[in-house]
Amino acid sequence: MSKLKGAGARDSSKARRKSNQAPKAAGGRKLSNWAAAQWRAARNRASYAFKLIFTVFGALLAGTAVILLVFGQLDDVGGMLAGRAETELEQAGYTLDWLDVAGADRTGVEEIAMAVGAAPGLGLSRVDLNAARDAIQSLSWVQSAEVLRLWPDRIAVLIEERQPYALWQINQTYHVIDADGAVIDAANPLEFASLPRVVGEDANREAASVIGLLTLHPDIRDRVTHAIRVGERRWSLRLQSGGDVLLPEDDPASALALLAAMHEERGVLDYEAQIFDLRNAGEMVMRPWPDRAAERAGRGA
C-alpha cells in the first residue's frame, strides 16, 4: 500500500500500514481473497459517494431540463453533468490518495502508478479502470492485472507476474521467456542462466512441450545442454558429449521413452555416438563420430 506523493507513489515499505494492507507475496487465491475483503470494506464507504452523486444530479436535473428544451443538445448536457458530478466528488474529498498493489514482486510501484495515471488530488471517479488495466498489462513482467476502485480514496491493483521458464536463443541473442513463450524484455538472461535453453524459430512457443517431456526422463534431461527447433516442426537435443538426439515430428514422447529404456538397459547415452536417430517410430539408429571410428579402426589394424 503506497501513499501517493508528488507525481507517483513511494515504496510500500515506507508507507502507512494498516490491517487491510495487500499481502506482499500472494498467489491467485490469496489475491482474490484480499480483493474480496477490500471490496466488502469499500461498500460502506461507497454508499456515501453514491449519495453525494445522487444529490448532485438531483440539484442539476431542473436546470438540465431547461437546457435540453432550449438547445436540444443531449450529449453536451450529459458531459456537463458528468463533469460537474466528478468535480463535486473531488471537492467532497473523493480523490486518489492511496495505491494498493498486490502481487508485484518484480514490477515497480512507480511503473504501476504511471500506468494508472495516479497523481495526488486526482478524482477517484476519473480513473479509467479498463485503460489502467491495459496499461499495466503492457508492462514486461505483468501477465495479467485487475484494477479496482475502492471508495473513498484508493485504487487497488492485483497483479499476476510472468515467471521465467526458459532461455530462448534466436539470431545469436538470448531472451527470457515464460511458460507460454512470451518474451520478458525486462529480464536479464545472465540472471537466469540456469534455465533450460531452446534454440531456433518457433522454439519459444513450443518450449513447454519439450521441457515437459524431458522432466519425465531425468537421466536424459541432465545430459541435454539445449533443445533445437528444426524447421518449426520437430526437436533435436544437443547432449553434453556434443552428440544429437533426433526426435520425430510425431509422438516425440514415445521416442524419448524408447531412448530412456535403451539407456537403462544398455547405457547407450554413454556410447561415443554423434547421432541418436529416433525419427522412425520404434527404432533407434546410432551413428558414431567419424574421427573416433577411424581412430578405433587404426588401433585395431
Image (tube, rainbow, N blue to C red):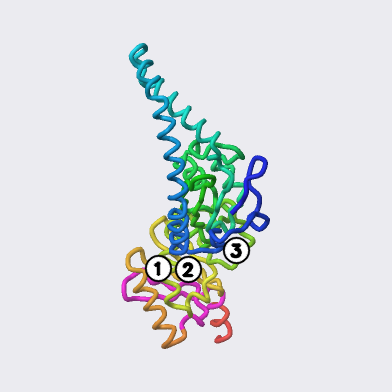
Tell me the residue at 47%/48% (across/down): 45
Answer left or right for 249 relative to 168: left
Tell me the residue at 36%/69% (across/down): 252
Q: Mark 3 Cα within 10 Å, few/some/many (few <14, many 20+)?
A: some
Image: magenta residue range: 268-293
Residue 271 is covered by the magenta coloring: yes
Q: Nearer the viewer, residue 100 or 107?
A: 100
Q: Are the residues tagged 2 and 1 within 8 Å (C-beta)?
A: yes
Residue 225's x, y, as percent? 54, 69
- Quadrant placement of the C terminus: bottom right
Q: Nearer the viewer, residue 57 or 206?
A: 57
| Separation of marks 2 and 1 at Cα, in angstroms | 8 Å
Q: Are the residues tagged 3 and 2 within 8 Å (C-beta)?
A: no
| Separation of marks 3 and 1 at Cα, in angstroms | 27 Å
- State the residue position of label 1: 247
Residue 191 is covered by the magenta coloring: no
- State the residue position of label 3: 192
Under mark 3, the amino acid is Phe
Tell me the residue at 40%/19% (across/down): 63
* Mark before the other along the chain sequence, 3 or 1: 3
- Quadrant placement of the N terminus: bottom right
| Separation of marks 3 and 2 at Cα, in angstroms | 20 Å
Q: Are the residues tagged 3 and 1 within 8 Å (C-beta)?
A: no
- Judge depth for marks 3 and 1 and give the one in front: 3
Q: Name the quadrant containing residue 299.
A: bottom right
- State the residue position of label 2: 237
Tell me the residue at 48%/64% (across/down): 27
